[in-house]
Amino acid sequence: MSHVNLRNAVVVITGGARGIGHATAAAFAERGARVVIGDLDEQAAKEAAAAIGRGASGHGLDVSSQTSYERFVAAVHDEAGAIDVLVNNAGIMPVGAFTEGELASARATIDINLWGVILGCHVVLPGMLERRRGQIINIASVLGRVAGGGVAAYSASKFGVVGFTHALQQELHGSGVTASVVLPGVVRTELSSGVPERGVPISDPSTVAAAIVQAGLAAKPEVTVPAWSGALMRTLALLPPRLRQPFLRATDYDRAMREVDTRQRAGYRDRLAKTVGASSDFALKTQDEDDNR
């Protein structure tokens, strides 16, 4: 049985202009939902909404800013009504050795990936609790269960999202409002460009979007994509380090995020720098740069 009747439900998706967010927005719209996309790139958000059609709309949103988030939610209320489902999807993933990257890159990752989720829940939950209905769906990662080298700050942010969601689930019990967390592996989007397709579960955006919609329909506490990776992640998390690390090395999990093709990631890094801030904030040193010294 559906927890939320998606027909005419107001579904907000942060970071919905591209990748998983765009695919998720389209999937909810196909179910009859009134979709509103929030994205730091306002023009891209509007273009994504226009491509989806079905009454979807797009707005600018900086998930790390309380003022921006409150202004965005007010606009959603004026335009579409109370929010039934909030999908906290906005995120960034700078890749590189932690000790070789700019500290501002790590800070931005935490601000967007974790603080953005906390802030979104802080702004939207009171209205849901007052109505005694609604759903929060937070997008984490398998890297929020089993950390990976090369994405230390990203792993930290996603561990935080998983823990925050589990705590919310306890607090929201019996309130009529639910919280779910979705943990994809590597998804074929611009964010994961250049990542080797080995050692970690691989999915397409449409597959992850379908899982997010199903999480909404069934109010599942936790969903992994692909589904089989859930049992593996939980098992690995229970293993002592002396057993876990050899397994991760044997499957290339420990190296997958450290052996990215930096040339393939150039477009993502350039867009990230232009959209989020100064290029120095995201100018992680690359193997190419090391080779040229």
Image: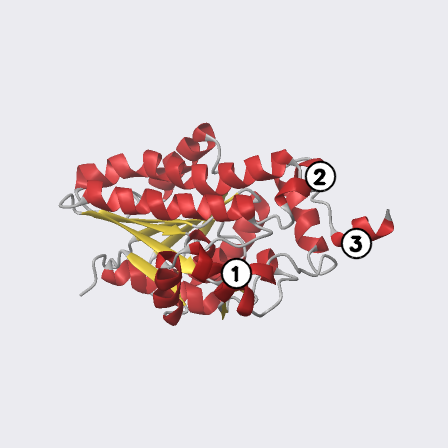
Q: Which mark is residue 51?
A: 1
Q: Which kind of residue does numbered mark 3 sit on?
A: Asp
Q: CA distance from mark 1 to mark 2?
A: 30 Å
The foreground one among 251 and 240 is 240
Q: CA distance from mark 2 to mark 3?
A: 17 Å
Q: Which residue does the numbered mark 3 point to in the structure image?
A: 288
Q: Earlier in the sequence, mark 2 or mark 3?
A: 2
Q: Position of residue 89 (x, y in %)?
A: 44, 50
Q: Amino acid at mark 1?
A: Ala
In the rendered structure, the answer to whether residue 51 lies left or right of residue 85 reads: right
Residue type of the residue flagged with mark 2: Ser
Q: Residue 91: tell me if it is visible.
A: no
Quarter holding residue 125: top left
Task: Kindly identify which residue carries mark 2.
Answer: 279
Residue drawn at x 61%, y 48% as measured from the top left: 94
Crowdedness near tag 1: few (<14), some (14–19) or many (≥20) residues, C-alpha within 10 Å: few
Vertical relation: 12 (above or below) 23: above
